[in-house]
Amino acid sequence: MAQKILIDMIKLRAAMVENSSMVLPEALFYPSGNSNGLKSVRELAIFRFTCRKCEDAPCIGVCPADALEKDEDGIITRYTNLCVSCKSCVTICPFGTMMTDFFKHHRNRDLFFDLEDVNEVEKFIKACPPGTVTFTDDDESPEKNIYKLNDKVLIKEYLYITEKQ
Ligand code: SF4
Ligand code: SF4
């Protein structure tokens, strides 16, 4: 994929509030390239940028399956192969960080798109609520709330920052 995509988490949340029964399409990278299971770009973005990285991380403490782990930067990873979709972490999170739908195991496979395939990327953009995912030539731009997830994906999100770096 030559061009990057920009996923606007702010607009995605608004679209979900407007239509709470909407099932969002998911972008994934196949193969996952890690040992903690295949997961969507949206989940990666939420844990990286939306999560407030609580020091005591109550989500980890409540998980009955030891499926959540925090790295040295405070970023949570969910081991999808351990997660039993109980959603206790969603309930206990004081900030409503997580969108509950990415905990569902059985979803319509037609809603999963491979970001390594340019045709799939185009289909993914079309399947998303209008204006929430776009092609972009931009780079990371914190003043516009745009951050780099990886070489192919930029995320627009409001970051929770407690002090100036
Ligand atoms: S939904 Fe998964 S990650 Fe969350 S508490 Fe339950 S088992 Fe743990
Ligand atoms: S409780 Fe919520 S905000 Fe806090 S670390 Fe867990 S997911 Fe992030």
Image (cartoon, rainbow, N blue to C red):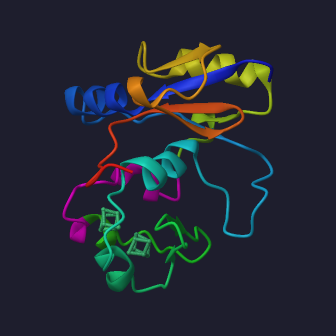
Instruction: Report which quarter residue 27 is drawn in.
Output: top right
Query: At which x and y percent is residue 26?
Result: 55, 38
Tell me: residue 95, above or below residue 55. above
Kindly identify the residue that appears in the image at 43 percent across and 48 percent down. Answer: 49
Tell me: residue 34, above or below residue 56. above
The image shows a total of numbered marks equal to: 0
* Frontmost residue, 28 versus 85: 28
Quadrant location, ligand no. 1: bottom left
Query: At which x and y percent is residue 78?
Result: 53, 68
Instruction: From the image, give the main secondary structure of the stretch colored magenta.
Output: loop
Left/right placement of residue 123 relative to residue 54 reads right
Kindly identify the residue that appears in the image at 38 percent across and 35 percent down. Answer: 157
Instruction: Report which quarter residue 91 is drawn in.
Output: bottom left
Kindly identify the residue that appears in the image at 29 percent across and 26 percent down. Answer: 15
Q: Residue furthest front?
A: 165
* Frontmost residue, 132 versus 103: 132
Tell me: residue 145, above or below residue 76. above
Left/right placement of residue 33 relative to residue 51 reads right
- Magenta-drawn stretch contains 115: no
Query: At which x and y percent is residue 48?
Result: 48, 53
Q: Which residues are magenta?
A: 91-106
Left/right placement of residue 2 relative to residue 48 reads right
**Which quadrant does the N terminus fall into?**
top right
Tell me: residue 135, above or below residue 31. above
Kindly identify the residue that appears in the image at 50 percent across and 43 percent down. Answer: 42
Query: At which x and y percent is residue 105?
Result: 52, 59
